[in-house]
Image: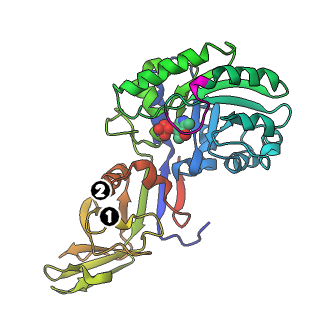
Amino acid sequence: MSQFPNSVAEVHIPRLYHNLEVLREPVADTVQSMAVIKADAYGHGAVDLARRLSDRVEWFAVANVDEAMELRQEGLDNEILVFGTPTKSSANAYLTYNLVATISGFSHFDCLKENTRYHLNIDTGMGRYGFLPDQVQEVRKAVQDYDHLTCEGIYSHFATADTPDSEKVYDQMEIFREIRSHFSTDLITHMANSGGAAFYEESHLDMIRYGIGLYGYNPGPVAIEGLQPIMDWKSYLAQVKPIRKDMTVSYRATWEAPYSGYLGVVPVGYADGVPRNLSHNFEVMIRDTFYPVVGIVTMDNIMVFLGEQQLQEHEEVLLFGKNGNTAYDWAEKVGTISYEILSRLTPRVQRRYVE
Ligand SMILES: *Cc1c(COP(=O)(O)O)cnc(C)c1O
């Protein structure tokens, strides 16, 4: 952990709880909750968020065994599902740490160790991991043959549930319903992500896998009403200095001061997670006022044109968050999604939890 961080990602726990309530609102009480905290909880800090969620969700999900082990080593004892594929080398860890594996292909039956618990993953149209629908009879047989393993669940993942009224979502649900009918009724059955939870009530089944919505962002362009971004990424003015008309700023001298005023330097750059492609195209907030970021984003710093305002050094700068621009606004500008902006904040950014 950094002793003298240049920036802090404040993660607001009351907003996290609020978002979980918003996401649970259309869902029956009998449906379980899985908090998807892969990739360090989309950059928010997996262990820290898991501690705050452990009484409010039954399950956690992570991408790989390392992420799951970290949760166990920190004493979390909720159920943990690993989305990624088991390997010979990771097989023992599923048992040692009581993790639930995902079986997505036939080779996984061979590599897992006796008594390992698993969920089957069916590819109903995502086109990523999972058995194909026409393999259902073989899968059923494998579940029976490998009875030294414990099949406890079956799931599938949507490709297009980030928006309402997607034809493909209904197709995937229909395919999954048919596949599901070939297996024991005891298996916990799940399909919905944040979009499924909000936009497709028929997808709720036994459990919902909540990811992006917990962090306060919409899965796509259509809003889930009431969500609040839980992270406010803040830095400060490390230097304020006069800049004369026609002076240029940053590499390649792409920006010239239109008139004499003040320039602020903020000590975050692309090595912290500010996309370089935002250059010339975004603003930050200082004392409730937006100021343009000028010149090219550098590795460790960005520059802000303050106009005639001679702001104080050490003044707080809001990069993104609930009350300024959001990670979604950044994502729109650089042609990506909020998921990528959030999960790309680097360890240089100190996470701080506001209870
Ligand atoms: C990441 C992921 C989720 C969560 O999706 P969100 O859109 O963030 O809610 C759910 N299920 C699987 C299999 C995933 O990989």
Q: Is residue 326 left or right of residue 124?
A: left
Q: Nearer the viewer, residue 203 or 26?
A: 203
Q: Nearer the viewer, residue 68 or 178?
A: 178
State the image coordinates of residue 177 (x, y, percent, origin top left): 54, 16
Describe the colour scheme in one phrase. rainbow
Residue range corresponding to the magenta coloring: 126-134
Task: Judge whether residue 18 is colored magenta.
Answer: no
Q: Earlier in the sequence, mark 2 or mark 1?
A: 1
State the image coordinates of residue 267 (x, y, percent, origin top left): 42, 74
* Residue in the image at 76% along x and 30% along y: 117
Determine whether the beta carbon of the residue marked 1 sits less than 8 angstroms from the nearest atom of ligand 1. no
Residue 79 visible in image: no
State the image coordinates of residue 331 (x, y, percent, origin top left): 35, 53
In the image, residue 31 above or below residue 342: above
Looking at the rendered image, the quarter that the N terminus falls into is bottom right
Q: Nearer the viewer, residue 139 or 2?
A: 139
Q: Is residue 88 left or right of residue 262?
A: right
Residue 327 visible in image: yes
For disc 2, the marked residue is 333
* Residue in the image at 24% along x and 62% along y: 290
Q: Nearer the viewer, residue 275 or 303?
A: 275
Mark 2–mark 1 CB contact (< 8 Å): yes
For residue 278, which numbered disc appears in the image?
1
Q: Is residue 269 left or right of residue 279?
A: right
What predominant SS class does the magenta segment belong to? loop
